[in-house]
Amino acid sequence: MKKEKKVIHILMTDYQIDSRVRNETNSLYKNGYDVDVYCLKSYKIKKSEDRENINLIRFGLVGNKLLNFLSAYIFMFVYSLNKKIDLVHAHDANALPIAYLISCIKRVPFIYDSHELWSESHHSISSKFILKSIAYVEKKFAKKAQYIITVSDSIKEFLQKYFKTEDITVIRNIPSYTHEGTYNILREEFKLSESSKVCLYQGVISQSRGVELILTAAINVCSREQNVYFFFLGEGPYLNELKKSIKDLGLSNRIITLGRVEQSSLLKYTKSADIGIHAITNSCLNHDYCLPNKIFEYIHSGVVPVVTNLYELNRYVIGNDIGLSFEDNNAKSLENQIMGLLENEKQFLRFKSNVGKLAKFDTWDNESKKLVEVYQKVLS
């Protein structure tokens, strides 16, 4: 099938893994668009590649982060001069300047894809001047976008006031990489009985994601209930300390770390769990308004979620009657909610049934239709 409209997505990382970008670009390709992704070179990945019919082109001089960004901007701009482009799609605030410049030179529309509430987030950058400058750039250029998309209703409502525009659509981070059938990898690999209960955390292993709090709750749950096991899937800055704490406590056979699992196989592991924990702390408004892909991964694996009572997470989980929420940064509250699910089989089965029903409706196939509608609107 001939691809008539050429669109470029700009992502200021080296794009090893980004499920949102992957989902969006694959859906656009299936709907007849010719898609390139402009991203950064790095020591890990320097060459361009074709990935699932999407052309990834990497730019920039590898080394200093600022040099990498600025040189990438220049190379992206020069590369685009003689290319056919019908639309530019900027992922997050740091892609806005070059996306806007290319759209001006090529006289084509551009879309701003806000993966988070950037102006109300924690950042690794410590310079207040740089943070204020980026916030200024985001606000200035986002207002010039023909359309804005974001990840949750709360962020949409905030951005509508912040950018003074109504043209914002929510496209949630629902996974496309689901698996049909039944998998029980964790019980099989670790020789657990079918009657055992498996609690799971998957994601970045860091204190800001509540991993230390989950560990505290897990220790107490394990002391109260002998047939429950906790698994941590993922990598991060707190992984080695987590492993050491578990070993020192003598709980390595009950609380288990598995490291990173390939995305293509991840939900096969998730399907082994009974309870999925997401314990991100309410340290900024971006966290309070987040609706992360992990919650949808749990749902599409038939897992009952237990989440921090952040505004958007609590509204989704409690509103759909699919699980429980616990008090932010309170390990005892998390422990009690997990024990409540373990001890109340009727409640657990009700949640699990509702999870299955919701998973049939909240799919990437349904979500991607909104993206296609935005593209049709912008390009009409």
Image (spheres, grey):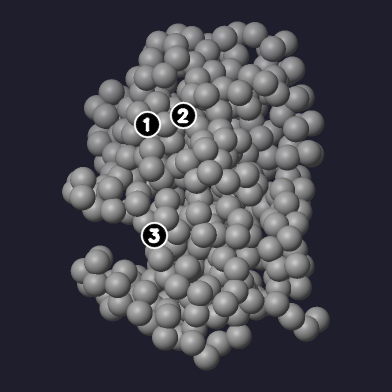
Residue of label 2: 288
Q: Residue at the location (30% across, 45% down)?
A: 123
Q: Amino acid at mark 2?
A: Asp
Label 2 to label 1, Cα distance in Å? 7 Å
> Residue 284, percent across and down?
37, 31
Label 2 to label 3, Cα distance in Å? 22 Å
Image quadrant holding the N terminus, namely: bottom right
Q: Is residue 3 above or below residue 119?
A: below
Q: Does dot 3 land on a helix, a strand or a loop?
A: helix
Tag shown at residue 50: none
Label 3 to label 1, Cα distance in Å? 20 Å
- At label 1, counting other C-alpha atoms closer than 10 Å, the crowd grade (few under 14, some 14-19, many 20 or more) is few
Question: Mark 3 or mark 1, which has the lower sequence index?
Answer: 3
Residue of label 1: 284
Q: Residue at the location (74% across, 80% down)?
A: 3
Q: Is residue 27 above or below residue 286?
A: below
